Image: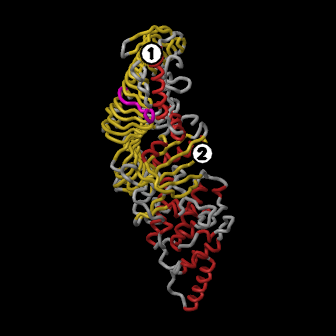
Amino acid sequence: MLQQYNSIVVDASYINKNYTQESVIGKGRDFYLGISSICYLMSHAKDGQKYILQIYENLGYDIFRTKVLQLQKAMLECVNEYNTRIVMIAEKEINDKQSDLYVLYRLNALKKRLDQEEQLNQEQALELLITFCKNLLITGRSTFEFLDLAPQNIFVDGKNFVISNMGISYKGSKFHRPYTPSTDNFYKDKSLANLIYTYSFQAGLVVLCAITKINSADFFFEDGQLKDNILQSVLKVLRENQKTDRSKEDQLKFDKFKDQLKKQINSLSKIEKPFEGDYKMILPILSQILSLDQQKRSIFQLLICYPDNPLKVEYPFFQQAIDVDQQYVGFGKLDEDNKIIPHGYGYGKFEDQWYYGIFENGELSKDGTIEMKTQKAVSYILLNLFENHSKIIVELNKYIYIGEFDQQKYIPNGKGEIIYVLTYQKNLPRKRQVINFEGDLKLGEKIEGREFYRNKSYFDGQFAKNSPREGIFSYGPNHFYDGIIEDFKRVSGKLYFGELTFEGEFENNKAKDGVLLYEDGSEYRGLFQNGQRSSLEGKYTYSNQKVQYVGNFREDTFHGKGVLILLETNEQVEVEYEYGRCKTDLPDNFKDALKKNKKQVIQKMEQKKPDSKQKKNDDDDDEQIKEDIDEGFADDDGQYGHDLDDEDA
């Protein structure tokens, strides 16, 4: 799209080919940009692993690029255990100005969502709140991804919670659940500070609703303004409910207040005990982050940060590097020398490489990214991006590689698959824009395998200098070439198009010298010029194998002097043609032989004539393949050079 930028965006057809849609999850909305998407449950065609495919449709260039850069940052630098991991970003071009954006997330065994969970106890509520804190510190420092905390976007994984980036929204329907006041400053000014305030409130309200099972819509008026009195009353009841030293009279008053409040909240009609349970550790924090005073919410980003760490997590977040050499920022703890031992998500410089991801006792252990920069390229090693592949190599603006590689140079070496970045191929013809390669490689060079292109063609065979050299090039149904290739052009081999076959030499990708076999059984041997028959000594054998013409051809038809031969008797007659029309009066036996041949050919063609629906499908297939393969093989009326007889040619 328009101009190039640092990208790892591949062609969307790769996802369409390798992943199968199982169901529609729902419609989403981007928390920051406000663009809509549709999310699908997908499975890998080979291993059956589950994924989420998110599609943003009809994006203009600026929005597309802005969103891609955010997603790439999340994919490469924010790898953690609290988000569904981004495994691929792809583009489907609609036209020169618009594209669909595909985002593929790893789902694995995640099934249950937070909105399907029973009321949370204090331990679960604390874990959920800590997850929200970690999510903000990990992604909110770098991107605007994974910031929609609506329960339908959060998965329950045993005792843990995983935040998706689907942004599923039911706005405009009875299932809509708002979690932020419409009066928040974020909706007027999308600054980082306002983002944190709004995110903090959303996090607090989601936790509160998960504790009580209150429908969040009960906290808002129709115009989106907060019913603060209801919210504060709920918090008050939860706080007061922790007291055990009330008098009988005070208890009656409190029970009455609870009953009245419950009647004001429609969603509690079926909840037996919405305010029961011990939540004394979490309530003071909820009271602060659910305040309309946005400054009070600022505590949220410090809840699990070193040194205060109000939530007392074992491995707090270090917002600034302590060691100048290491430059580590993330979760961990201090050792005896007052250095951070990374544990949990973090990023830092280790020797001459940057590490991003999940650490365990100072080592990058699980999911993560290693960034390597040279003067020529920026490469990444992605840990555990796909099942059964502990390391994936990504070179910025070039490719994603899955397979065996050289352990010192970190380049493809052995069996593997290269998925090519689309952005930096757009200046090439579509027939040279590579989607992916599967096969054998040696130190970065393709040796043998199968390569797929954006014009829906593919090559299967041997490579030289990373280009197809010898093998089969398939252009569509019953349309392929088998032979030697140089610079993507046919050199010597066989070309098949439907029931038409040419075998011989090529020049500028067109037939030069060889044998052309027609669908009716007729045959031409000789030279070609610009793909058309053009020869002083061409030989055409009619389909009944009883008549042969030897002589001049020009502009793909008989022209000039030649000889007609009856092959059974070897009887010959000299003839002269003018652009396909015979100027010589033929003997009757020659005329009869040609007419019989014509009749047989017409009968065969009528039997093979496709119905209109099939012809349309074939035409559609041909339209998809922008290839000049048949230039010079067809006459103006579309018939492939059938010289039915000299009178009608």
Residue 473, label in figure:
none
Dominant SS in magenta: strand
- Badge 1 marks a residue whose secondary structure is helix
> N-terminal of the two: label 1 or label 2?
2
Q: Could one spot residue 536 in this view of the protein?
A: no
Q: Quadrant of the N terminus?
A: top right
Residue at screen point 44% across, 44% down: 17
Residue at screen point 67% across, 66% down: 225
Q: Could one spot residue 480 in this view of the protein?
A: yes
Q: CA distance from mark 1 to mark 2?
A: 67 Å
Image marks 1 and 2: residues in contact by CB distance under 8 Å:
no
Q: Residues within 10 Å of mark 2 (few under 14, many from 20)?
A: some
User: For mark 2, what is the residue?
Assistant: 58
Res 220 → quadrant: bottom right
Residue 589, label in figure:
1
Residue type marked 1: Asn
Residue 207 point in image, percent of width and height: 52, 68
Res 259 → quadrant: bottom right
473 in the magenta segment: yes
In the image, is 484 to the left or to the right of 249?
Answer: left
Determine whether 115 is above or below 193 in the image.
below
Residue 587 point in image, percent of width and height: 47, 12
Per the rendered image, the range of residues in magenta is 469-478
Task: Please name the colour scheme applied to the rendered image.
Answer: secondary structure
Q: Nearer the viewer, residue 552 or 232?
A: 552
- Badge 2 marks a residue whose secondary structure is strand
Q: Residues within 10 Å of mark 1 (few under 14, many from 20)?
A: few
In the image, is 330 to the left or to the right of 179?
Answer: left
Determine whether 259 is above or below 499 in the image.
below
Residue at screen point 33% across, 31% down: 447
Query: Outermost residue, right direction?
Result: 223
